[in-house]
Amino acid sequence: MYSRIIGTGSYLPEKVLTNFDLEKLVDTTHDWIFSRSGIVERHIAADSELTSDLALQASLRAIAAAGIGADEIDLVIVATTSPDQVFPSTACILQDKLGIRNCGAAFDLQAVCGGFVYALTTADLFIRAGRAKTALVVGAEVLSRMLDWSDRSTCVLFGDGAGAVVLRASGRPGIVAGKLHADGSHRGLLQADGNIRNGEVQGDPFIKMDGKGVFKFAVKVLSEVVEEVLEENNLQGSDISWLVPHQANIRIMEATAKKLGLSMDNVVVTVAHHGNTSAASIPLALDTAVRDGRIKAGQNILLEAVGGGFTWGAVLMEW
Ligand code: ACO
């Protein structure tokens, strides 16, 4: 038994914040941001929009693309680091908003920017084990509410958005392999250490990052995990039709593609238009490349991501 993606969808909030807009907020320039990250603009959720609202729009599009009814979904996993509230999970809220009444499990998965590869691998394992038939796997974030808008080293890099896929049991792959890793000893490089205690937020509720440390760590572990997946499946970089990386930063994507011996012509890059949307970035990029016809039946697709934790992983698929 395998699992296959049968529909993709994505959603970006209406409000766009360009690098030029940011020049008016903090001491930065479009050229600095673009040359360091490849980002041109990011989308910001409206005050009334919650992570589950973004997830709902992306999910409705993925469900429509799959041509199924929402009530056929028996597993909902939402990868997010910016849930609607402490509890219940955003997945349960999404399940209710979608009107899925006879769901199996619904839960959030928190692996920061590694969240979507973690969630997709988890859903694949549920399906392979016969515990679910049709899974909705979502990456959704409203990171703008976790940013210190006076800290130029972080606020220019992130954005809000959501992406979703419908994953269904199938006699042929589909997902061929998923590799996940974690190393909590580096958690100080990227974190929001705030927590609730005695009715107040203790610590720092905003994202703090050692940019250079993250960059070095990300390139190292992404290259390693991608090589690991290829080697185990007797493939080379040249066998990959499309690399769909976590959209954090164009320079990390370029460095990983180079180590793989892959041309940037085979890398799906959407970071310019939404910045780093954490767990949402891979399904956003995937949906873009599916809808514009770049991703076609029979191709080998490789997803890879790294995020706070640290968590990292890769998923290999036949489309
Ligand atoms: N505008 C202008 N100057 C800035 C800005 C800004 N927005 N932010 C920082 N600077 C300044 C710093 O204060 C510093 O100044 P100083 O030298 O006077 O102290 C200087 O720029 C640092 O410049 P660089 O060394 O050129 O910065 P670097 O090339 O390391 O780029 C960046 C910084 C973009 C954060 C880079 O390290 C990076 O991409 N890191 C990876 C971060 C990332 O992708 N995180 C995403 C989350 S994790 C994940 O998703 C994998």
Image (cartoon, rainbow, N blue to C red):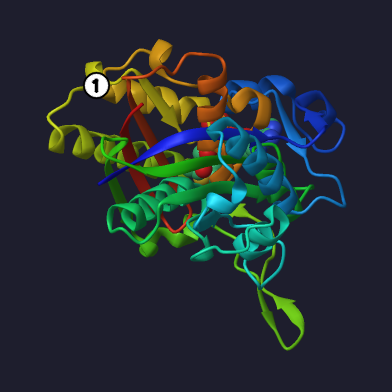
Q: Is residue 101 shown above or below 161?
A: below
Corner quadrant of residue 187: bottom left
Q: Which residue is depicted at the point 34% across and 30% down?
A: 302
Q: Position of residue 264 (x, y in %)?
A: 41, 14
Residue 166 percent across, percent down from the top left: 50, 42
Quadrant in the rendering for residue 42: top right
Q: Which residue is mark 1?
A: 237
Instruction: Residue lying at the far bottom in this picture: please name it.
Output: 198
Q: Secondary structure at mark 1?
A: helix
Where does the C terminus fall, quadrant-wise?
top left
Q: Residues within 10 Å of mark 1 (few under 14, many from 20)?
A: many
**Left or right: 105 in relation to 19:** left
Which image quadrant shows ligand 1?
top right
Say if disc 1 is inside 8 Å of ligand 1. Answer: no
Query: Which residue is at the front of the view, 1 or 299?
Result: 1
Would you place residue 37 above or below residue 297 in this image?
Answer: below
